[in-house]
Amino acid sequence: MSLQSLPKADVLKACEPMLRKQLYVIFTKPTNGLDPVMAVLDRHLAFQVELEERGVMFGAGPMWNDAEDAWEGEGMVIIRAASLADARAIADSDPMHKAGARSYTVRPWLLNEGTVTVKLSYSNGGRLEVM
């Protein structure tokens, strides 16, 4: 028989040399087509910028369909929160979810590996690139 799950403590121990940064991923999808989503998009985007300015937002954006040629209203938001309950409270306060335009699920996510490279070029007016 193969393992079906491991206790969180065992995973954390196995990942000791890694970053082990606890984040939360909010997967969001339309509840009734794109019209309700588009009706609150401006308020949703302002909310996202507010989360970013407060240091809550790690990253967010729309998810393309599998053919990568259209958007069907799904999105993903990665946030910093003290707990799953706090992450759900943040998701609840999103205008998309408050209006019922989208439903969501929240999953705890342990960020272990990856790289962020930042390039700042002075000659182009200080344009910052993240690679």
Image (tube, rainbow, N blue to C red):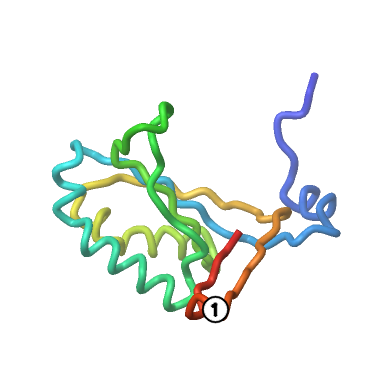
Element marked by disc 1: loop
Q: Position of residue 49 (x, y in %)?
A: 36, 70
* 106 relative to 11 in the view: left or right: left
Q: Where is residue 125 in the image (x, y as percent from the top left)?
A: 48, 80
* Viewer-nearest residue: 7 or 38: 38
Question: Residue placed farthest to the top in the image?
Answer: 1
Q: In this view, does 120 lie above or below 13?
A: below
Q: Position of residue 50 (x, y in %)?
A: 35, 74
Q: Where is residue 93 in the image (x, y as percent from the top left)?
A: 30, 64
Kindly indicate the quadrant of the structure image that contains residue 30.
Answer: top left
Neighbours of disc 1 within 10 Å: few (<14), some (14-19), many (20+): few
* Viewer-nearest residue: 103 or 42: 42
Residue occupied by mark 1: 123
* Viewer-nearest residue: 59 or 120: 120
The residue sitting at 32% across, 38% down in the picture is 71
Screen quadrant of the N terminus? top right
The residue sitting at 61% across, 59% down in the picture is 131
* Viewer-nearest residue: 3 or 72: 72
The residue sitting at 31% across, 68% down in the picture is 47
Residue type marked 1: Ser
* 100 relative to 128 in the view: left or right: left
Looking at the image, how many numbered discs can be counted on the residues?
1
* 61 relative to 29 in the view: left or right: right
* 83 relative to 10 in the view: left or right: left
Kindly indicate the quadrant of the structure image that contains residue 89.
Answer: bottom left
Kindly indicate the quadrant of the structure image that contains residue 2.
Answer: top right
